[in-house]
Each structure stands twice: as C-alpha cells, then as structure tokens.
Amino acid sequence: MTRMRKGLNDRLLAWKVSGGVKQTVADMLERGGRNAMVVIGSIVIMLVVLIALLAPVLPMADPTEMSDDLFEPPSTSHIFGTDENGRDVFSRVVWGARVSLLVASFAVLASMVIGIVLGLTAGYFGGRVDYVITGTIDLFWTFPPFLLALAFAAGLGAGLFNVVLAISISYWAGFARLIRGQALSMKERQFVEASRALGAKNWRIMFTHVLPNCLAPLIVWASIGVADAITIESSLSFLGVGTKPPTPSWGWMLQSGLLHLGSAPWISTFPGVAMVFTILGFNLLGDGLRDVLDPRMKGLRR
Amino acid sequence: MADLVAYILRKVILAIPVVLLATLIVFLMLFMTGDPINVLSPPHASVEQLDALREKYGLNEPVYVQYGLFLWQLLHGDLGVSVGFFTRDLEVGDLIADRLPRTLELMAIGLTISYSIGIPLGIFSALRHNSLGDRSVMVFTLLAYAMPSFWLGILFMWLFAVELSWLPIEGTTGGFASIILPAMTLGIGNAALTTRMMRSSMLEVIRQDYITQLRSRGLPEREIIYKHAVKNAILPVITVIGLDIGWFVAGSVVVETVFSWPGIGRLITDSISNADFPVVRGCILVLALFVIAGNLVADILYAYVDPRVRLG
C-alpha cells in the first residue's frame, strides 16, 4: 500500500514537474518569440554576455595596464580611446561588463533565494508565520532598494562581495512578495491537495509543486532585477562605495571621466552607452515577457 | 469621514515599525564598519583618548542599550555629532538642516518637471494608441527608464553646459539656471514612469461605457477627452505622487553628487569619503523618513479618492 502510494505520488510529481516547467519554458519561448521586445532584449543580452565571456580571449589591451598615451581620442589602436591613466577604454568597458553582470547575477540570485524561501514559507503556511514574514517583507518593500543598498554599502565599505551583499539585502522583498502571492493561490489548487492526500511532505509540495508554477513571473522579475541591480551597482560605484578600483566598473569609469568631460568625453561616454545598452536589454526582456504572460500588467510598473 | 480618520490613524500606527527598522539599519551601519571607535575617533588617538571616547559614546554598554540610547537621543532630536575632519563636533542635525532646503527645492522642481512632461505625454500616447507617436513615446520611456540618473546627468552636463554653454556646469552660483540641469535629470527618469501610468490609466478610462455614452450624445471629442476622461484618468496618477518621493530621494543622492548641488545627497557622499558616519546615518535616516512620509501621503490620498480602500 505504502509502496503503491509512493509510486503514484512520484508519477504525479514527474507529470507535474515536467509538464509544469517544460511547458512554461516552451510557452515562453513560443509566445515570447513573437514579441519584438522579447526578441530585441534577448539579442542584446546574448551579445553583452558573449562579449563579457570572451573578454579574456579577445585581442585587446589589459584593462588595468597603464601607459604613457593619456587621453588619446578614439583611433585604430584604441577604438574607444584611452583614459587619464593611459588605459584602453574599450578593454575596460568589456571587462566592466563582466563585473556588472557578475555582481548583478549574484545579487539577483541571492535575493531570489531569500525571496523564495521566505515567500514560500509565508504563503504556504499562512497564519502567524505569514503575518510575521509579510510584516518583514512590507518593511523592506517600503524603502527604495538604492537607499537601503547605499546604507549597507557605506557601512560595509567598497568591494565586490560587499556590493552583492548590499544589493541582495535591499532587493529580496520584491521576490518574496511575488512568490508569496503565487503560493497563496497555488496551495488551494487541486493537484496540491492531491499530493497532500498522498502523503507528500510540506517542503516537498512547496518545492516541487508550488515553486515550479511560480517560474514564469520569477523569470520576469529576475530579468528586471538584473537591470535594477546593474543600475544600483553602477550608481554605488559612481559614488565610490561599490566595487573597488582598479576593478573596471562602469560606474567608477563614469565618475573618473566626469573630470575630463570637456577635453576627453569618450572616457565617460562609452561605458555609459554600454551600461544603458545592457540595462535596456534586460528591461526589454522583462517587460516584454510580462506583457506576453500577463497582459493585465501592461504599462504598470511599481 | 470618520472611517477616513480611522484609516489614517491605522496607517500612521503601521508606519511606526517601518521607522524603527530605518533607525535600526542606520544604527547597525556603524557596526558594519568593524569597531565603531575607529570611525568615531580622530586619527592617531592615544589609548586613553580612545577609552574616554568609548565612555562618551557609550560603546562599553551592551548593543541593545546603545540602540535604546540612540533612539532616546533621536526622540530628543539629537542625531549626534560629526566626526569629519572639517566639521568635527558640529551637530549632525544642524548640518542636515543647512542642506535640507536645497534638496527640497530640487525635489519640488524635479517633481514639477516630471508631471508636466509625463501627464501630457501619457494622454497624447493613449489617444493615439499604437500609432507611430505612441510608439515613439514608449521608446522614450524605455530609454529614460534604463538610464541611470548619474549617466543622464553627465549627458546633460556635457551637452548643455560643456558643449553649448547654456547653463552652469555645477554648484549653485548661477541662481535659478543652476537648478535646471539637476532638476531635469531627476524629473525625466520619473517622467517615464508617470507617462506609462497616465497612458494606461487613460486607455482604461476611454474604453468605459460612460465615455461611449457621451460620444453617442454627440459631445465634442475635445470636451469628452479633457472634461471627462482626463479628469478621471489623472486621479490614480496623482495619488501615487507620494511614492515618487522614493525615486527622488534615491535619485537626489546621485544627481546632487554629479552637479555638486549642496543638498543632503551631496552631504552623504562627502561624508562617506570623509568616513563621517554619524552624518551619513543622520542623512540616510532623514531621507528614509521622507520616503515613509511619502508612502503615507500616497495611502491617504488613495483612500480619500477611493472609499473602498478605507472600508476594506
């Protein structure tokens, strides 16, 4: 009897998971492929990620190597020119992409983990647990993530790990809200009840039934989250509390170029354009997917 | 009306834990740096001096006692004293009070710019739904939203101050001309949000039955749009004005730094580079209070406009 029940539960799980995740992804690809925003966003992201990944093998100067060619305007030897220390701006922009993407993905990943754990627990169990967690979520949700991140970053000091930490602590509330809402509606669904009747444990239901069904909105949020995290990271670096020089960071490059805006505008311009291009890509993908998946949310973003 | 008062009271009480969280975060900020005494003491202080300072700042007490003390001082309007090189022992409260009007000024003009761009653009876009004009406006909002404010500020500075020399580069010496670029930088990012909200709100309204009914009665289109549709569509946009404070607070730190605008934001970045943490935490706390107040205003306006909210 127990064996049979277990077998049935496994089959139910297998069906649900494969159907759920695979179907969601296939659905996203199919419908997203017809949406201009999704397509353009994906192309931009792939381009940026590809260049960032290829940075070590691309034929270009070392991003931290200084030379005597200070403030050289863009030319064939330095296509984006050189900065105040004679470093190749193109190479710094490319390596800056690595830093930005790295910080943003880890920050979003960490926020997502915090958000999933807290959101699932609150939404699935309800009651007093929900009350406490939702209270905490709302507290963090009240403040603009940038202000929170600035407070944490200022306290922790500059550095790659500290920036990731500061952004994740400030950004998780959005994910938690999202997951909680989904979990609330999912736990009433029949397949969850069926699984419970078959004796599945709570955590198993949460992670194998409820979570996969949150996948679509999670992807939307993650994409917008990466764009926000890049904005926060570069703003923090611009203010001097983000990544530490000589790590090439777009925000810091813009800050140092600010002094030479009149004489050497290329020092600020190229990292700025690369940054907007990347943020735009992730925003387009996120907004486009959301329009495709949930047309009611169109045009609203708060 | 009584239910509205009760609603406001409830919201004010609910804001208290949020204020406490803000104070807790800025309180803990000093401990994130390692031993707070390193931040609070002048360089090369002797061991005796350090001990005296520990005693003075109450650092020998348990952390919760220190937090209690911090709150107690806050309740008396005491934000502590600066430890910066040039401002040592000056009251943080006074330093902030000096800068606050500048930030408020910037936010007020930024908000005005944001709404005077966002609302007309949103209406225009909704009335020409899916046309070339609508699409261009949407592209503008996407770009403006993707633009971190410091980068937009640098672009404005480069174009209007360096290349065209129309406006002063930074500081406040140019009188009103000085505020235009920073306020525009702050305003345009938010205008993107306002445009989108106004557009979707307007799109929703013009599909309502009463608009069709007005058309069938033969009212001039102009009158239908401006007298009836806009009036209703603008309400949800105006009620979130309080939420915009969050955007402006976050943006002001960056924009004031770009344009050397002597407000609270600039004070934060200057104090961070001077390791003047009492000032940093004072400023962040004040900005956080602004955000909380803004949220409260949004809640209240929303309930005032839509009675269902306060009864629910």
Image (tube, rainbow, N blue to C red):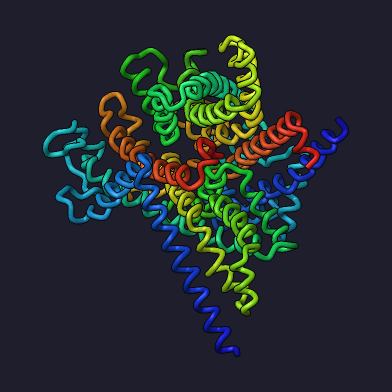
**Residue B160, can we see it?**
yes
Relative placement, left or right, of A269 versus B245 is left
Q: Residue furthest right?
A: B2
Q: Is residue A252 above or below residue B105?
A: below
Relative depth, front residue between A275 and A250 = A275
The answer to whether residue B91 of the structure is visible from this angle is no
Q: Position of residue B10 (x, y in %)?
A: 80, 42
For residue B301, above or below residue A140: above
| Residue drawn at 47 percent across, 74 percent down | A14
Q: Could you say which is closer to the camera, residue A79 or residue B189?
A: B189
Residue A184 spot, x, y in % from top left = 64, 58
Outermost residue to the front: B216
The quarter holding residue A250 reads top left
Residue at image coords 49%, 50% = A221
Horizontal placement of B7 versus B41: left or right?
right
Residue A280, compared with residue A258, is above or below; it is below
Q: Position of residue B113 (x, y in %)?
A: 53, 20
Q: Position of residue A20 (x, y in %)?
A: 48, 63
Count of numbered circles in the view: 0
Where is the C terminus of chain B found, in terms of image quarters?
top right
Q: Residue at x 35, y 36 (%)?
A: A254
Residue name at image x 82 percent, y 33 percent: B4
Closer-to-camera residue (B195/A169): B195
Q: Height in image: A231 above or below B104?
A: below
Residue reaching furthest top?
A: B220
State which quarter of the image contains the N terminus of chain B: top right
